[in-house]
Amino acid sequence: MTFNPLRERGIPLDRQLRNWRELNVTPIDPDHADPYTRCRIITMNGIETEAVFFSHHLARHCPDTEIRQQLARVRYIEAQQQKAVNWLLPGLASVLETTLAYEQVAVDLTAWVARMEPDAYLQQAYQFGVLEDFDHLYRYANLYEMIEHRKAEKIVDQLTEVMPGRPTMMHHRDPMDNVREPYDRNNTAPISKLHALTIMAAEQQTMNFYMNVGPMYMEPIARQLYQEIGLIEEEHVTHYESLVDPGESWWEMLLNHEYNECYLYHSFMETESDPKVKSIWELHLNMELEHLRLAAELFKRFDGREPEQVCAPELPAPVTFEPNKAYLRELIATQIDYTTLGTGYVQEAHERFEKMQEALMGGEKPPSERVIDDNRARSGHEYRLQTEGEHPVQSLALNR
Ligand SMILES: [Fe+2]
Ligand SMILES: [Fe+2]
Ligand SMILES: [Fe+2]
Ligand SMILES: [Fe+2]
């Protein structure tokens, strides 16, 4: 069944506003929900947050009051969608539990995107990044065991393994080396544009989350670990946003944003296991179809092209949350020692990398290393969840 969102009719904009009762969604059950339902909620919260902020930036560059009024109307609906989506998360979950879920999203969403990405340079960017969020999950899982006395499998279940990836201390690169080459908007496959927007939005929301929740902890190691990983999420946003062609006009960017929202709500509607959550994906898809139509009107008027010239003629295969264990193990075995130099990748610690490491670390262990030492000292072991056997890199194996 092909689905072309540019041809579908959605809910008219003046019928999209919801009252308090309609916004008062029932949260998912923290103990029995499908972990991937929580991952879809977190992903869509990141997408809606990006929709709101992108629209604000566009409005700040837009001299026409009438257009700014239309942007404000659509943006208010995006803000309501963000509330409905993020309020599906239960208040019972701790900040650290939500953090583990954010890193699970980063791992399984980025791995899936890497597997599906047709462009080799873009694929390399996702493969590079996913090994870092994979390691963050391991560091936070040890913090979780140490301060909440619980195991990360309570959150990730058996779907995502928890063990070292590229060690977090090696993620601190000179900021110059976090900038990649963008795709070419005229030649890249439409799916590549959608992938880049999705991962950029997901990483941006993780960055925002750590910025704000890090200082809510009392424990010094927790405060420090959030600072360290928070700075790496800044690197990740730089890395992924630089993949998007900055030569796209504002209207083309708006069109791509709305198309991507349609794509993701449609994907999650097709793959959702929780019927109540599924009905929200379906409702929001029907809202996004109208946002897309309005964006397409603006694109035709100000960019002078047809939306079909830049968008896919039908929705690509649905974005799917599923385990990526074998794929991740393969990447760990082959790319764990990669770093970046300029817009490319190398396997040696070059001068600029060493300089950054020295400036940040000054010969001392960073929080991401101390959290493992501390948990070993307190719990008698470090926390891992290796469902598929021993770690693929011998020096990182438990029984080495
Ligand atoms: Fe939206
Ligand atoms: Fe991360
Ligand atoms: Fe990240
Ligand atoms: Fe939208």
Image (tube, rainbow, N blue to C red):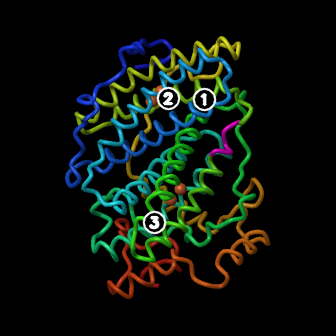
Question: For the residue with label 2, is its CB less than 8 Å from the closest atom of ligand 4?
Answer: no
Marks 2 and 1 in Cβ contact (< 8 Å): yes
Mark 3 packing: few (<14 Cα in 10 Å), some, or many (20+)? Answer: some
Residue at label 3? 215
Circle 2 sits in a helix, a strand or a loop, which is it?
Answer: loop
On the rendered image, what quadrant is the N terminus found in?
top left
Q: Which residues are magenta?
A: 241-245
Q: Amino acid at mark 2?
A: Pro
Q: Amino acid at mark 1?
A: Pro
Label 3 CB-ligand 2 distance < 8 A: no
- Residue 47, image x, y percentages: 48, 38
Nearest the eye: 175 or 221: 221
* Amino acid carrying mark 3 in the image: Pro
Q: Which residue is mark 2?
A: 316
Say which residue label 1 marks. Answer: 190
Determine whether 240 is above or below 316 in the image.
below
